[in-house]
Amino acid sequence: MTALLLALAVITASQGSAIELTFPNQPGLKSVEVNWQNRKVPAVLVGDKWVTVIGVDLDLKAGEQKANVLLTMDDGRIEKQETVVKVERTKFPTTELTVEDKYVQLSPPDLARATREAKELDAIHATITNEMLWHEPFSVPIPGGKGTNFGHRRVFNKEPRAPHAGADLRATTGTPIHATNRGRVVLAKNLFFTGNTVLLDHGLGIYSLYAHLSRMDVNLGETVENGQVLGLAGATGRVTGPHLHWGMRVQGARVDPFSLVEMNEK
Ligand SMILES: [Zn+2]
């Protein structure tokens, strides 16, 4: 059999964005998987197309990156199709600050707690659930809300901090926070940096995080619908005032949450 035709061969994506990939279905095609950044990302059959989403981390090197598409046929044959992702640079703002050390140095117990929690989150983000739990476009957790600060780099006393991996949305304490899409609650608890935090698994390695909540209204393991209220905005954790910190990870890549919302708008 000749090589299968794919809908794409070269695609362009910006640092810190999510991109949807689609492949036409073919007779005898059993499964489709994309190898991206050393992770195996499954595609799922939706109607007559195989669909998946890959994430371009905000720090991924600009230039050409390979995404190998593996097509497994009913008879067990595997066909490989190379796709090139052209990663374009995104200019993120940088702020340099000089502050008293006591404001940036954590106490040993706080540091131990923050480190343990970061590992817990990394382990969740590294898990790719082999199904697509959502069926509708991604939505903004505060309807009509605008985000700021994604990718913002802060340098305190000449020491670079981790770039801001989410979007901050203006909110007063008590503002209802809605699920960006259908998914499963994989974490709902208080964390050192992000305070009361809800984390949803949407499948295919896509996770959404909602931080600094004053109240959490969902439980671990629960499946929530797109737009369902997860809790109320607040100022818990290390913050200076109430707002929603909304983070999205795609196979561990830190992406601008609004890139997922825009993904389905085109
Ligand atoms: Zn934030």
Image (tube, grey):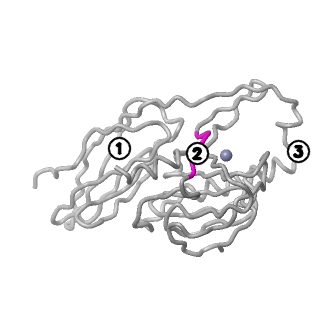
Q: Which residue is mark 2?
A: 147
Neighbours of disc 3 within 10 Å: few (<14), some (14-19), many (20+): few
Give yes or no for contact between labels 1 and 3 (Cβ–Cβ under 8 Å).
no
Magenta-highlighted stretch: main secondary structure?
loop
Q: CA distance from mark 1 to mark 2?
A: 30 Å
First in residue order: circle 1 vs circle 3:
1
Element assignment for label 2? strand
Q: Position of residue 225 (x, y in %)?
A: 51, 71
Q: Which mark is residue 107?
A: 3
Is residue 137 inside the magenta stretch? no
- Residue located at (88% from left, 30% from top): 100
- The amino acid marked with disc number 2 is Gly
Screen quadrant of the N terminus: bottom left
The local crowd at label 1, few if under 14, some if 14 to 19, many if 20 or more residues have their Cα within 10 Å, is many
Kind of residue indicated by mark 3? Ser
Which residue is found at the position 61% from the left and 44% from the top? 165
For label 1, the residue is 67
Q: Nearer the viewer, mark 1 or mark 2?
A: 2
Q: Position of residue 229 (x, y in %)?
A: 61, 69
- Which region shows up in magenta? 145-150
Estimate the x, y position of residue 26 in percent, counting from the top left. 17, 61
Kindly state the secondary structure of the residue where label 3 is placed: loop
Q: CA distance from mark 1 to mark 3?
A: 43 Å
For label 2, count other residues whose C-alpha is less than 10 Å away and answer few (under 14), some (14-19) or many (20+). Answer: some
Q: Name the residue rendered at 41%, 64% in the picture.
A: 136
- The residue closer to the viewer here, 78 or 165, is 165
